[in-house]
Amino acid sequence: MGALRSFVIFGSLASSALSTAVPPLQPRAVAGQGWSLQSASCPANTKSCGNGSCCPSTSNCQSTGNGEVEACCPSTSNCRGSVEGAPSCANAAWSLWTGSFGNGFCCEVGLTGAFVNGGSVAGICVTSVPSGYSTASLVTKGTGAPVTSTPPTSSTSSSAHSTTKASSTKSSGSGPTSTTVPRAVFAHYMVGSMNATDAVQDVTDAKAVGFDAFALNTHDITDPWALEALGYLFDAADQNGFKLFMSFDMSWRTTIAPSQIPSFLLNYISRPSYYTVSGRPLVSTYDGGFITNSDWLSGFKQPLQAQGINPYFIPNFGDWSGWPNNFFSTYTVADGVFSWESAWPATNTGKSNVSDSVDQNLLQQARAAGKVYLMPLSSFQFKYQGSGQDWYRIGEVNLPQRFQQILDLQPDLVELITWNDAGEGHYIGNFFQQQIDGTNIGDYANGFDHTGWQQLVSPFIKAYKGGTATSGSQILPPGSAPVGSLWYRTLLTSASCSSTIDNSEQAQDTVNFAVLLPSSGYTIKVYSNNGLIGNFTGTAGLNYRAVPGLSVGGGQFIQIVNSAGSVVASATGTKQVTAQSSNATCNWNYEVVGLS
Ligand SMILES: *[C@@H]1O[C@H](CO)[C@@H](O)[C@H](O)[C@H]1NC(C)=O
Ligand SMILES: *[C@@H]1O[C@H](CO)[C@@H](O)[C@H](O)[C@H]1NC(C)=O
Ligand SMILES: *[C@@H]1O[C@H](CO)[C@@H](O)[C@H](O)[C@H]1NC(C)=O
Ligand SMILES: *[C@@H]1O[C@H](CO)[C@@H](O)[C@H](O)[C@H]1NC(C)=O
Ligand SMILES: *[C@@H]1O[C@H](CO)[C@@H](O)[C@H](O)[C@H]1NC(C)=O
């Protein structure tokens, strides 16, 4: 029985269904405010913002955020958040397009918007779409006269944007802050075959880390193995003071329909452990945006409301290629929004860092609608199951960079992906053999313990829920000793099997660490094959690096040295690094070791 399932849908069934479901935008027109025009030479009555962007000459250029273009603002105050929330062009003569990450940009009428998936700029304007580019979606056609040619602009304007940064300007704060939900951090949990003992262990471990609840990834609501596992989990949570809620996995497409959810949910929502928001049972999804808003309403939400139960619904209806604007007017069924894919850099973006532009967009939309944003946090992804199921999503320092982005953006809720998905590598808790029986997941996950990451996640949860931390320097260890972890892959990127892994070009041969220091005065030393490859002066709070120089052999370790020169903590890898794989598994899973 397939207890685990593949999470990422490459290709874009979900996104194409989404884009057809989005109604035309009705931009709120503010004179001189909106996305800039993408053009190497700026037309009359506009000024150049640099980077191939033009704004009306009376407005101000606001420099670009990750994966976006310059915004044009009527005054010197930054209007980027408003433009993200209600996308329009700064001049109604221009056409509004959406490209990479669903971000808006503007072209003169007659030109076509084009973009690179996951690119660092929303899009460019061309007479014909260059190879490697996709055609953007036209949102509103401008009122201007058509032009028929474009200066040689595209390559320069896109490469000018080719650097990305991990943190970005905080545009989310500019909308109304409407949320009243208590902050919470959930862990995504793959429901699989298990026994009562396993359930108690997971619940008590997750509670000890500081999680508020498991989001139970449920794709089967009839088979005995699934109902049994849910029973064990709810019993364990009831008895141990932990919470749970359902996250229906709609990517299976045939196993759950919205209309089957009410009767199923009634078996669980009265359990003391069912997570509620103001008394309303929380329900989430992975995928499901291919089902219409009205089917979600009539099948799922309204029948429960008729019985006096008002579910608090925070679905994940997107994929990595971007999100519709007007999410909440499209999906009126939603009380909030969750975005799975923004936890990692988009695929095929080279050695890029994770962007928070999708998060910013959704948070802004949620604020504007008086709804909530559930922001994802994850370490990396690695899956190696053959037939198109072999991929890597960057993990060098993704986890600490997401910590910083979350503290910077201050979303309403956070979900760690995942507690126990061994198949995709991003587990931080235990996984149990019977959950992966009959698969080859053990070939790359057995013996690769990731609980060392819990040393970082726990203080992060505390900092985020405390509500005052806005940067990594405010994530402090629980006591006077440094905490943190070391992680590295045990196979070099030059291994001949690497080409079998999709997106392998994102990886680097680095020894990675993140440590939380109680104060300054410490040095962090990084070793590979027993040689010093990095020596960093620590600062209070979060310190992290991906240190180049991972080399073949043992002796992969980090040391935290105090000002007197004593080693006060260290983490030592238990696995050798090799240049080639000894067998058919090209294992890019991480060896993760916590400090002790
Ligand atoms: C041009 O793009 C770079 C890189 O994205 C950015 O740092 C800079 O602020 C931009 N310049 C302007 C004027 O927007
Ligand atoms: C990613 O972030 C790291 C750490 O902040 C930084 O050193 C590196 O230059 C960044 N990489 C890119 C491609 O921006
Ligand atoms: C429960 O399953 C675990 C492995 O998942 C096994 O080690 C343990 O012995 C089982 N416990 C019981 C009581 O069957
Ligand atoms: C490859 O070797 C590793 C460790 O040596 C082992 O865990 C794994 O099962 C092996 N994979 C295959 C396909 O034989
Ligand atoms: C590491 O850095 C410390 C503090 O900056 C310095 O005193 C020490 O000499 C350095 N060690 C090495 C081996 O570079």
Image (cartoon, grey):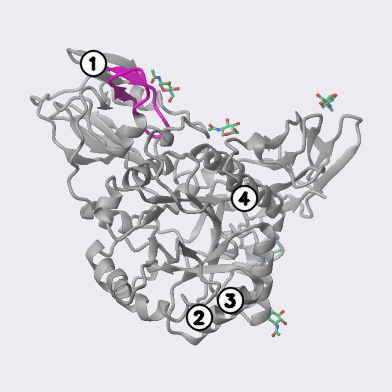
Q: Is residue 372 left or right of residue 517?
A: left
Determine whether label 4 and label 2 are within 8 Å by CB: no
If you read the primary sequence from the N terminus, does the residue marked by circle 3 or circle 2 appear first? 2
Image coords of residue 365 (percent x, y): 34, 44
**Amino acid type of the residue tagged 1 in the rendering:** Cys
Residue behind mark 2: 226
Q: Is residue 303 left or right of residue 108?
A: right
Tell me if the residue at label 2 has its CB under 8 Å from ligand 3. no
**Residue contact between numbered discs 1 and 2, judged by CB atoms under 8 Å:** no
**Residue tagged 3:** 233
Q: Residues within 10 Å of mark 3 (few under 14, many from 20)?
A: many
Residue 555 in magenta stretch: no
Disc 2 crowd rating (10 Å Cα; few below 14, some 14-19, many 20+) is some
Three-letter code, disc 4: Ile
In the picture of the structure, the residue carrying the numbered disc 4 is: 461
Which of the pair 72/82 is nearer the observer?
82
Query: Nearer the observer, disc 1 or disc 4?
Result: 4
Q: Identify the residue at the far left of this view.
A: 145
Between discs 1 and 2, the one toward the N terminus: 1
Q: Nearer the viewer, residue 152 or 513?
A: 513
- Label 2 sits on a secondary structure element that is helix
Disc 1 target residue: 42
Q: Residue at x 13, y 29 (%)?
A: 109
